[in-house]
Image (cartoon, rainbow, N blue to C red):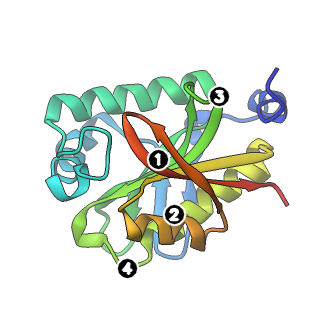
Amino acid sequence: MNKYLQNERLEIFMIDITNIELETDRLYMRHFKTEDLVEYSKIMGQDEVGKWLPRGRGYTKEEVKKFLESISKHWQEKGYGVWAVVEKESGKIIGHCGLNYVKQNNEIEVLYGFGKDYWGLGYATEAAKAALAFGFEKIGLNRIVAFAKTDNIASKKVIEKIGLKYIKDIEIFGMICAYYESYKS
């Protein structure tokens, strides 16, 4: 058994994944719902957002639907996953953030993506900090990683602000990415 997943497996059975929600000062982080598809597709369909993701472009509504299905399956299989991020003030979904098991590397990553209208407002940092805390404190993970395309300066700054340390550049998901890691303190 992978030493990083050992504690996770012990904790999973004590968590009711249907009710896992996080709250920060300005955000709610909740499970995606079927009715989120249209609003979330508008975010993921933005080429400015998609250029930083593996496809390198905005996602189609069908691709977003498949992504949401994979998020739901991940929660069921792992007991953790990616949340819809909702701005408290407006009640709108502004992006996603959470923890994802990366089979290719047998690691757990913190990831996030926000609509371009919400860039530069600190939302990614706020949500990612909450996801990291959840991973270390509630799930009991010992290590969490993050990836950002090497030219995505804003994302690399977020990753560094939340305390992950740059290790090296790697190829993953068909992209060259900066690879970061953090250990439970």
What's the residue type where badge 2 is placed?
A: Ala
- Look at label 1 and name its amino acid: Trp
* Residue at left offset 17%, top offset 46%: 58
Q: Are marks 1 and 2 in contact (CB under 8 Å)?
A: yes
User: In the image, what residue type sits under mark 4?
Assistant: Leu
Q: Secondary structure at mark 3?
A: loop
Label 1's element?
A: strand
Image quarter of the C terminus: bottom right
- Quick one: 85 or 58, which is closer to the camera? 58
In the image, is 159 to the left or to the right of 59?
Answer: right
- Residue 154 sits above or below residue 185 on the image: below
Please name the residue that numbered disc 3 is placed on.
106
Measure how far apart labels 3 and 2 are at the Cα level. Answer: 23 Å
Asked whether the residues under the numbered discs 1 and 4 touch, taking CB atoms below 8 Å apart as contact, a structural biologist would say no
Q: Which mark is residue 92?
A: none
Q: Residue at x 23, y 48 (%)?
A: 44
Tell me the mark number nearer the camera, choosing from 3 and 2. Answer: 3
The numbered mark at residue 83 is: 1
* Residue behind mark 4: 121
x and y, in percent, of residue 138 in the image: 76, 48
The circle drawn on residue 127 is 2
Work out whether mark 3 precedes mark 4 in sequence or the reverse, and give the earlier one.
3
Looking at marks 1 and 4 on the same chain, the residue that comes earlier in the sequence is marked by 1
> Which mark sits nearer the N-terminus, 3 or 2?
3
Check the image and report above or below for 111 versus 23: above
Find the distance from the CA under tag 3 to the CA under tag 1.
Answer: 21 Å
Residue 48 is left or right of residue 97, and the answer is left
- SS of the residue at dot 2? helix
Return the x and y of residue 100 as percentages of the image width and height.
54, 38
